Image (cartoon, rainbow, N blue to C red):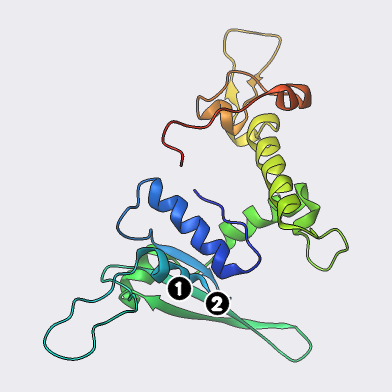
Amino acid sequence: MARGIAKDETQASVTAFRMLQRRGHPDRPPALISDGWGGIDEAMIEVFGKVPEQSGRGHPFVHKRAQPGWQYLQMVKHRDIHGRFLGIRLRVVFGEPAAVLQLLGKSTAYVERNQLTKRTFNSRLVRKTLAFSKSLQMHEAAAVWEDSFYNLMRFHKGLRQRVEDDPSRHWHLRTPAMAAGLTEHIWTVKDLLWCVPLPAPNCT
């Protein structure tokens, strides 16, 4: 998982891909599906692309290019002049079409559900509102707070565990951080505000 925050989608994607590169994808990007907005393919080439080796005479290559084995699928939404949804066209940007479709499927519903959750807890991400961030620094701060609340303070029904030896309760509630073994209790706002995070050893 990675998150990139910037003033445009290309720079945000570059930030996210560099984070993924440090987290286990040093040579190639993971298989990816997105909507039809541009910039992600350019970011993939910027981070993971390579300049072709020169063979023979001529001016040497200077621009990076996509590499074999990449898999990237776009779902381009089509709308009429009034903005009404008409349908989706699948566009394979990188990779062999049949293999990409089999791996990534034909839907971004799980990603859209994640976006809905983020917009629910962070009004700065809601479209067509006056609550948008006026500065990148404040937008980053709001995103960090939203991530912290979601992972440390909010328990999820899908992560709860059934209690067998305590007749007074049926479930042991857990947050994503508890499920990942990062903490043993549900945090409060006071816990979060009094916590001083330390940088990980491999952070740069």
Q: Is residue 70 above or below residue 115?
A: below
Q: Quadrant of residue 146?
A: top right
In the image, what residue occupies the spot 69% across and 14% down?
169
Mark 1 = which residue? Answer: 41
Q: Is residue 165 above or below residue 132?
A: above
Mark 2 = which residue? Answer: 38
Which three-letter amino acid code belongs to the residue tagged 2? Gly
Residue 55 % position (x, y): 13, 83
Q: Quadrant of residue 62?
A: bottom left
Residue 55 relative to residue 201: left or right: left
Q: Is residue 166 above or below residue 173?
A: above
Neighbour tally class for label 1: few under 14, some 14-19, many 20 plus, Cα within 10 Å:
some
The Cα atoms of the two marked residues, 2 and 1, are separated by 7 Å
Residue 141 % position (x, y): 72, 45
Residue 137 % position (x, y): 71, 52
Look at the numbered disc 1 and give the secondary structure of its residue: helix
Look at the numbered disc 2 and give the secondary structure of its residue: loop
Which residue lies most toward the left here?
56
Neighbour tally class for label 2: few under 14, some 14-19, many 20 plus, Cα within 10 Å:
few
